[in-house]
Image: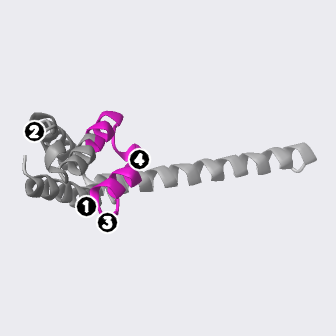
Amino acid sequence: MEIDSLGEKMEELRLMMREHLGVRGRDFATALRRAGRLLPRHLQREGRALIEAGEMARSPRLMKMIDPQRTERAYREIRRYLESRDPMERRIDLALSILGGMALAVLAAGGLVLFFLIWRGYL
């Protein structure tokens, strides 16, 4: 595993995280930290393994300790997950969640007003 290819892969994943998850960061480590619960736990672990490999790749002695199969597998798993995420679907889910919360609040307020009117004898 070369330093350049690992750096390019991490940059590609950072850009994909920005596009598919809406997570910004100046580097992959920052984007991974900001993604938080948007990524499953096992993918967060894989992302940390990539970051660790990137740090190890800076030193020629430590570079020999990098497991290329592990880093390639981590890259492929994170990439596969990000490709399966649809940004439009995420936005629609967020909008429906907000509308559902608002509808529940309106129903609760209406129920309280109705209860108050019955309790005071107006209905």
Image location of residue 98, percent across then percent down: 50, 54
Front residue of this view, candidates 25 and 20: 25
The magenta-colored residue range is 23-48
Seen in the image, is 115 located left or right of residue 61? right
Front residue of this view, candidates 26 and 115: 26
Residues at discs 4 and 2 in contact (Cβ within 8 Å) = no
Kind of residue at disc 4:
Gly
Seen in the image, is 59 located left or right of residue 23? left
Q: Is residue 107 visible?
A: yes
Q: Assign a secondary structure to mark 3.
A: loop
**Mark 1 vs mark 3: which is more N-terminal?**
1
Of labels 4 and 2, the one closer to you: 2
The kind of secondary structure the magenta stretch mainly shows is helix
Q: Is residue 57 magenta?
A: no
Residue for badge 2: 68
Could you say which quadrant of the image residue 69 lies in?
A: top left
Residue for badge 4: 36
Image location of residue 120, percent across then percent down: 92, 48
Seen in the image, is 98 located left or right of residue 2? right
C-alpha distance separating marks 3 and 2 = 25 Å
Residue for badge 1: 19
